Image (cartoon, rainbow, N blue to C red):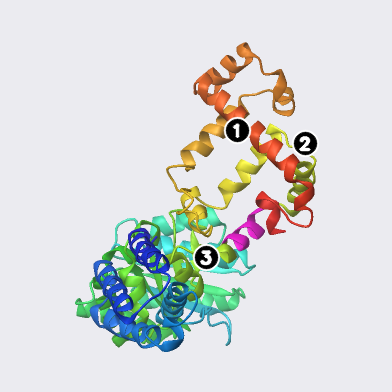
Amino acid sequence: MFGTLTARLEDIFSKLQGKGKLDEKSVREALREIRLALLEADVNYRVVKDFVARIQESAVGEEVLSSITPGQQVVGIVYRELVRLLGDEAEPILWKGPMPLVIMLVGLQGSGKTTTAAKVASLLKARNKKVLLVAADVYRPAAVDQLRILADQLEVGFYRMDDVPPKEICTGAVERATREIVDVVILDTAGRLHINEPMMEELSGIAAGVKPRERLLVLDGMTGQDAVRAAQEFDKRLDLTGIIMTKLDGDARGGAALSVRAVTGKPIKFIGVGEKLEDLEPFHPSRIASRILGMGDVVTLVEKAQEKVDATKAATLQKKMRKGELTLEDFLDQLKQIKTMGSMDQLLKMIPGASKLGLNASAANDHELVRMEAIISSMTREERRKPYVLNGSRRKRIARGSGTRVQDVNRLLREFEAMRKMMKRFGSGMRGKKMLLGQFH
């Protein structure tokens, strides 16, 4: 997410911070580079022009140029303007009003709308909401079956009607939800081209019929300014209440995400950051601005850990680490919990300064986690608890059983032992602090 843009901005700021004193010429040169970086990221040119002008107005002031740390001051100004550009505050779902809450999802063909409907359902179910998914896409082959399979997987309600117009399907679904005291109805409408007038009229008819409180446009973040133009067209017809950006995990530029709020005035409410049904996050402008500038996103990382990590296990593990009693069995359990939080690539991007420390997906990726898990799983319980019993023949057996090499087994054991000793050495100094996943509780 935003990888290319982040790398460019980090390079620009590194040059600024390397200078003991800044003058207006240095700032203007840096702003010129920022402008080019944003344009190359496919950010709307008017948005870029206004953004850079606001930074320049603040950055060339006497207070910044005479500061002891002018480079850091400029970074701070860029951060504040990024937060402003992205919408200042997170805007949650509009819960206030009669139930059920009706969420109407609309979008272009191929934007990932049906999968997003299931992701929204997954997120709301985790908040103890009773959800009904509605198959209102009667045009795309297998769309109804796809949504039904996802609903079954999530164990949420599913509604369909055959051989009737989408408006009747949606009306019937809301009536059923009212009878059955459902909290949220999610309407998965058909994807369309915004220039297709009959299809746009159909959406207007559905909105008039069921009066959805949330009218959310699902946009493919990788389509850049085409996504922004589509948002403008849909907003004219439906008066959107918000936007969901999908596929941001594969978008190294981020132009659509940085442009759409400024151009349409509509908030981004959620972002899709992966293929799994739980890979949907509420959109927080300040956190996204931190990620863009390479500052990480510790708050989201903490929230993920709190959702996924067993607090009792974390506390027990913390005590064992302080005493240097961590076993490979404990380590295996940690690996499994880390995997539930998302890909290593996503998690590392949330750690401040990870890129500067060389921590990236190539250094510690999901394949490595799988390999480590396979090696430890191929050990007996005694071997996991007492690694010192692992002689040459046992290591060969473990390598064969895990589909790895003896060298891989040896490397894992060396790294584990080094980590265990480090934890024991610093354990007393870390009292009151929590390490690894335990730090989040």
Q: Residues within 10 Å of mark 2 (few under 14, many from 20)?
A: some
Q: Which residue occupies 49% across, 50% down?
A: 357
**Residue beneath label 3, please?**
121
- Which mark is in front, 3 or 2? 2
Q: Which residue occupies 44% across, 76% down?
A: 70
**Residue beneath label 1, please?**
415
> Which residue occupies the extreme top position in the image?
393
Quarter of the image holding residue 166?
bottom left
Q: In the shown orientation, is residue 145 left or right of residue 120?
A: left
Give, as a three-letter code, the residue at label 2.
Glu
Q: Compared with residue 406, is residue 30 higher up or lower down, i.e. above or below?
A: below
Q: Which residue occupies 51% across, 81% down?
A: 89
Give, as a three-letter code, the residue at label 1.
Glu
Magenta extent: 301-309
**Label drawn at residue 325:** 2
Q: In the shown orientation, is residue 415 left or right of residue 46?
A: right
